[in-house]
């Protein structure tokens, strides 16, 4: 019998990838086969292509911000990008991203940059009829923001400084606003600050150049892999303040011992966040439904699989808006 094939963006090595014909995956009994309607492309995908990633197993179809349609029922779903064991203490506590045997879509399991994908039924999140697939691709990155702020409950109205005015910085600002915190955004790039304002203005969230912020803050979070931002965050925090390490800095350098010691001397609370759980994406989808027009401003380009190789190097340099692939 002839194997049915589909088009997919396949990464085979560092800076080595192609749009290839690959076999259509077969869905196991606890899975469904989805037609991918939209898949967000983010800086993590660029990292996978440009320099590899800790959790990556090659060859691989990337794509972890996906929305698809069940070909049998016609129902549309956002997808929690993981297959988990479902029985460990982390899974039972609703922290699937920490499951020791998690297979992450686009890293250790095939992702959404393909025409079709097999998805565990437990990873499906039904989509409301009025949410477009493109907008719903924000459920995963926004879910990561929900996860971060869920790790450590800050009192309402706490001021929080967000480092980095890329898409993740903007989504963190939106999430902080929804969680009744008082976010302020900063960046070293005047252009990013300028473009951030159109998104932030409806929520009355201010943004500044990093050099213009010298006052102490109660909480800080990094949405950039620049080690300087982590060092700045630790130095600007008030004694007893809260630091969220949201963006890894592994490939960019090290935190100095002097910076790290501020956790000790100022008795800071420190919180890490990596990915999200399904419950965080469910919250994110409700928030997306509350501000569809504002969040749509983050989605500027839509393109097919064949253009991914030219977009990834641009994303690697940093982009103020989200790119959507329609396979
Ligand atoms: Zn992403
Ligand atoms: Zn588990």
Image (spheres, grey):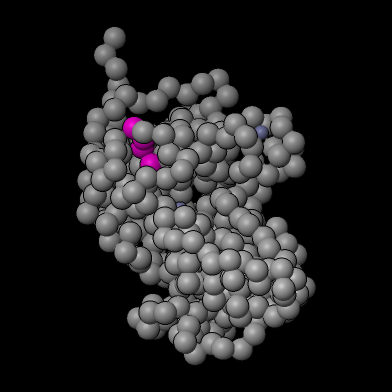
45 w.r.t. 74: above or below: below
275 w.r.t. 203: above or below: above
Q: Position of residue 115 (x, y in %)?
A: 34, 37
**For the point 57% across and 80% down, which residue is it?**
184
Viewer-closest of 133 and 177: 177
**For the point 45% across and 78% down, which residue is it?**
187
Q: Position of residue 177 (x, y in %)?
A: 63, 74
Helix, strand or loop for the magenta stretch, by majority: loop
Q: Which residues are magenta?
A: 59-63
| Quadrant the C terminus occupies | top left
Q: Residue furthest top?
A: 1
157 w.r.t. 221: above or below: below
Viewer-closest of 306 and 44: 44
**Which of the 4 quarters of the picture holds residue 305?**
top left
Is residue 315 found inside the magenta-colored segment of the image?
Answer: no
Q: Count all numbered tags in the image, as a single digit.
A: 0
Viewer-closest of 216 and 28: 216
Q: Can residue 130 be spotted in the picture?
A: no
**For the point 47% across and 87% down, which residue is it?**
211
Q: Residue furthest front?
A: 257
Q: Position of residue 295 (x, y in %)?
A: 48, 67
**Which of the 4 quarters of the picture holds residue 1?**
top left
Q: Position of residue 17 (x, y in %)?
A: 25, 40
Q: Can residue 17 be spotted in the picture?
A: yes
**For the point 70% across and 58% down, which residue is it?**
151
289 w.r.t. 69: above or below: below
């Amino acid at each position: 019998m002839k194997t049915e094939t589909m088009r997919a963006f396949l990464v085979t090595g560092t800076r080595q990838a192609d749009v290839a014909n690959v076999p259509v995956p077969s869905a196991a009994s606890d899975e469904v086969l989805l037609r991918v309607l939209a898949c967000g492309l983010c800086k993590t995908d660029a990292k996978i292509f440009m320099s590899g990633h800790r959790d990556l197993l090659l060859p691989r179809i990337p794509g972890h911000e996906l929305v698809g349609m069940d070909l049998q029922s016609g129902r549309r779903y956002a997808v929690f990008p993981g297959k988990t064991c479902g029985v460990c203490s982390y899974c039972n506590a609703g922290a699937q991203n920490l499951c020791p045997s998690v297979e992450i879509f686009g890293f250790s399991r095939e992702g959404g940059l393909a025409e079709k994908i097999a998805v565990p039924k437990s990873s499906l999140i039904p989509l409301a009829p009025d949410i477009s697939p493109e907008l719903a691709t924000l459920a995963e990155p926004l879910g990561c923001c929900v996860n971060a702020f869920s790790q450590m409950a800050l009192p309402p109205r706490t001021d929080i400084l967000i480092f980095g005015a890329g898409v993740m910085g903007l989504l963190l600002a939106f999430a902080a606003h929804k969680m009744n915190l008082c976010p302020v955004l900063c960046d070293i790039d005047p252009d990013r600050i300028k473009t951030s304002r159109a998104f932030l203005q409806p929520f009355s969230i201010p943004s500044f150049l990093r050099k213009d912020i010298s006052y102490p803050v109660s909480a800080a979070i990094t949405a950039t892999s620049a080690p300087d931002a982590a060092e700045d965050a630790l130095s600007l925090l008030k004694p007893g303040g809260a630091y969220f390490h949201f963006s890894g800095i592994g490939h960019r350098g090290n935190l100095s011992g002097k910076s790290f010691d501020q956790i000790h001397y100022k008795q800071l609370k420190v919180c890490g966040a990596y990915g999200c759980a399904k419950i965080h994406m469910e919250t994110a989808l409700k928030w997306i439904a509350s501000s569809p027009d504002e969040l749509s401003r983050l989605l500027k380009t839509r393109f097919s699989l064949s253009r991914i190789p030219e977009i990834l190097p641009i994303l690697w340099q940093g982009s103020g808006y989200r790119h959507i692939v329609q396979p």
